[in-house]
Image: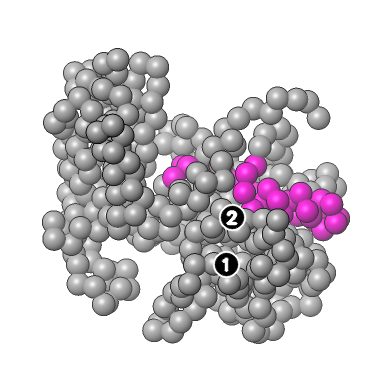
Amino acid sequence: MSLPEDVKIVEKGIIPKKFTLINGLPDVGLVGLVAASHIVSSLKMEEVGTVESDLFPPMIVLHDGLPKSPIRLYANQSLVVIMSETAIPALLTRSLAEAIVNWAASRNVELMISIGGMAVQNRQDLDVPKVFAALSDKSLEKKLGGAAEILGEGYIVGAYALMLRKCAEINLPAITLLTQSFYNYPDPEAAAAAIGALNRILGLKVETSDLLQKGEEIRLRARDVMKRTQTEMARMGKSQEYDVPALYG
Amino acid sequence: MDEYFKRAEFMVERVFAPGWNEAAESIEPLYHITVGLSEVIVTVDLPYVNPDEVTLKLPADDTVEFYANTKRRITFADMGVTHRGGQFKSYHARIHMPVPVAESGMTSKFKRGILEIRLPRLV
């Protein structure tokens, strides 16, 4: 059983009073991580917090010579982005999901959007990957505005699954965007498609041309994180997302 | 039993090896194996590679080896890592197949930077 205090959000900067929370955790195709990282740098967001746990591997990541927590929060006037530069240990999935949702609820977040990938076997043949959405409530279809196709039936495995269900239980509006992607290769094209959907939903203007131009560089740099994420995805039984649900409704 | 230990050793190496071989100036790429009823499909992620730079070999019926030159030399410094001095000019991997496969009838395609190899099963 996980305890909420296993994982905690530590605020270090100014959190906007009203905001949309975007989650970009390492997952299928690293779509969320690549998209979140690009959003943070494009919008020049400020680092405002970290996600901490004694149960995480003892590590820091160095950027510009300074030590940083691998899981960080960034913010501007209306958005907060949570992203992780390291694979999330499968055993901590539930604790992390609860901590993020509890924190978001305590901050009266207006909307939570989680960005991830949906593994498809024919991804190599898709010129433009499609974006699908799972909603915490049907009323969010209007907010979606046709930016993504509703995911009617299927399985979602991992932190986003737990977050979406908890958000539905506590009436916190949440959308999980899943873009067709490679299962275990970093997919910048899918991340760009996800950002396109996000731009439509939130009225953002995040350009993705340079993300696509840097595609090969991103795939190489993200190689090690993808490898570790593969291991954790296997541990949590991620392949069940390929299954067809047995029952109706 | 030997086969079991060989497989276990392979899995440990695959999971924990860093994959940046500075001595050989090569990178072990990400790859995935799918075993079907009549064929094995291997996909390999190969950023910075032109399709005509890929060489495929089957040194044994349970092993696929491939080698691909990169378009340019890649260094750790390119990725902002300055405390390691490695540079890389190729990808290389020797992949153990879960079932025996045949070289004749092998097909491959390279699209979106991903190499897909299809190998007929022997058994």
Residue where numbered disc 2 is placed = A91
Label 1: which residue? Answer: A55
Membership of A22 in magenta stretch: no
- Numbered range of the magenta stretch: A156-184
Q: Chain of mark 2?
A: A
| Residue in the image at 35% along x and 16% along y | B38
Q: Is residue A180 magenta?
A: yes
Taking the image as shown, residue A170 lies to the left or right of residue B82, namely: right
User: Tag 1's secondary structure?
Assistant: loop
Residue A151, compared with residue A110, is above or below; it is above
Disc 2 vs disc 1: Cβ atoms closer than 8 Å?
A: yes
In this image, A163 relative to A217: left or right? right
Q: CA distance from mark 2 to mark 1?
A: 9 Å
Q: Looking at the picture, which amino acid does disc 2 mark?
A: Leu
Taking the image as drawn, is residue A79 in sight? Answer: no
Occupied quadrant, residue A131: top right
The residue under the point 26% across, 16% down is: B122
Q: Chain of mark 1?
A: A
